[in-house]
Image: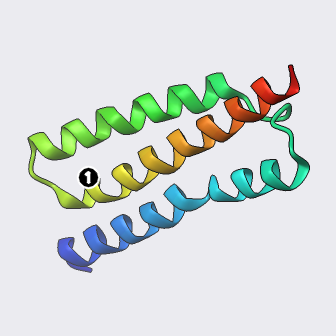
Amino acid sequence: MSETFLGVLAAGWGVVMALSPVMQIRRMLHLRSSRDISIGYLTIIVIGFSIWIAYGVAINNLALVVPNCVAFVVGTATIIVALHFRSAAR
């Protein structure tokens, strides 16, 4: 396998992985609750995504930048939805 093929495959699968928290958002919206969601865990993951984005930009590697940007946005959206339901529960 070529390096380019592996890069495209990894970036494509990274986008799929980055979109997976959308299922959590969907569940929170359905249950109208975020009590089962760890906001601390999500925050650590989002910080990690931002570090990978910075590294990808530094080495000019879109295979790192694109999936981690998607993951950052989806992770941040998950945190926002979770916080919304936490504040609504009070």
Q: How far across and how far down the image is residue 4, in percent?
A: 19, 74
Pick the quarter of the image with the N terminus.
bottom left
Q: Quadrant of residue 54?
A: top left
Image check: 32 left or right of 75?
Answer: right
Q: How far across and how far down the image is residue 28, in percent?
A: 80, 47
Viewer-nearest residue: 85 or 57: 85
> Total of numbered circles in the picture?
1
Viewer-nearest residue: 49 or 78: 78
Q: Amino acid at mark 1?
A: Val
Residue located 62% across and 43% down the image: 78
Viewer-nearest residue: 89 or 34: 89
Q: How far across and how far down the image is residue 84, in percent?
A: 70, 33
| Label 1: element kind | helix
Residue located 79% across and 52% down the image: 29
Decide: is 41 above or below 58: above
Residue located 52% across and 26% down the image: 44
Pick the quarter of the image with the C terminus.
top right
Question: How is colour applied across the structure in the image?
Answer: rainbow
Image check: 45 left or right of 83?
Answer: left
Question: Badge 1 local density, few (<14 within 10 Å), some, or many (20+)?
Answer: many
Decide: is 48 above or below 65: above
Residue at the spot of label 1: 65
Viewer-nearest residue: 79 or 38: 79
Q: How far across and how far down the image is residue 88, in percent?
A: 81, 29
Residue located 36% across and 73% down the image: 9
Decide: is 28 above or below 83: below
Image check: 52 left or right of 4?
Answer: right
